[in-house]
Amino acid sequence: MAAEPSTQTTSDSTGSGGPFAPELLVESKGAVRIVTLNRPDAMNATNEALHESLIAVWAHLAKDPDARAVVLTGAGRAFSAGGDFDHFVELWDDKVLRRKEIDGARRLLTEMIEFPLPVVAAVNGAAVGLGCNLAVCSDIVLIAEDAFIADPHVGVGLTAADGGAPTWPLLMGMLRAKEYLFTSERIPADQAVVLGLANRVVPGDQLLDQAIALAEKLAAQPPQAVQSTKRALNMHIKRAVAGVLEYALHEEFHSFDTPEHQAVVNGFLARSRARTEKAARTTS
């Protein structure tokens, strides 16, 4: 029987912020576990440490005998801005690390689909690339009014493997998935609900509270019934993803070598450095 939810939020018993801190925080609120992507200065973009933590956290939570539901959110003003462009540069020459990342992308999607407990995503800001995949691979998605979802893989010269290609056609239909993936267009919160990428729009200042309340409601349900129903529903996702993910990840691995991708990343980093230098001159 599910534990009675507590009103007190505490860090994971393994220490302040849990075993994946500081990049990923795990807190407990009764039978609910709150998982927070915690690179706010980088808009929770995934570097190697955060990516590894996101892979490992699901098995960790599945072994927690007192956990019944999970809330997934981001610290600061973003849910997750996807990949870290500086990290992309590392992957150009280090193909061993690139292979590890690609294999990790496969493991992350598999871990989320196989995870037994219900997951409520509280999309508090931009959910981009891998960030959008984290959101839509959750079981229920609440999205803040000013948040958006986007998969810009194609726009930055990469195959949309750990983004929308495996899952979006199942959620919104093939034609709409093609349009948004080919164009890398942002999907505002209300449109995400219309398309089937989110359940409902919530005022930003109420988002986390509503997500926790919903997770507590799920945690109070009979656990075997909830978990077996989730497993049955996720069989549809597993069948849809089978084959697509392997091909798309294979192509994404090679996308990193293309001149188009590298030009986009170099251009972005150059503009970012110029803005930083200008700001430094202004304040000096």
Image: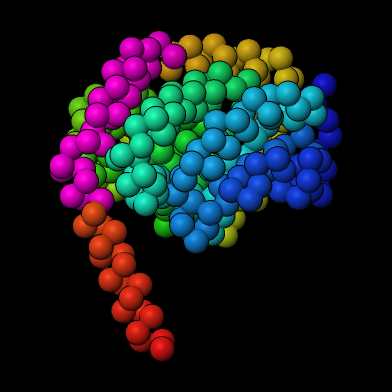
The magenta-colored residue range is 238-265
At 38% from the left and 80% from the top, the residue drawn is: 280
Quadrant where the N terminus sits is top right
State left or right for residue 233 relative to residue 16.
Answer: left
Residue 144: x %, y % from top left: 48, 52
At 44% from the left and 29% from the top, the residue drawn is: 100
Q: How many marks?
A: 0
Camera sees residue 41: yes
Between 188 and 248, the residue placed more toward the observer is 248
Looking at the image, the residue that sits furthest to the bottom is: 284
Q: Is residue 259 magenta?
A: yes
At 29% from the left and 22% from the top, the residue drawn is: 250
Quadrant where the C terminus sits is bottom left
Residue 123: x %, y % from top left: 49, 47
Q: On screen, 119 above or below 86?
A: above
Quadrant of the image occupied by residue 273: bottom left
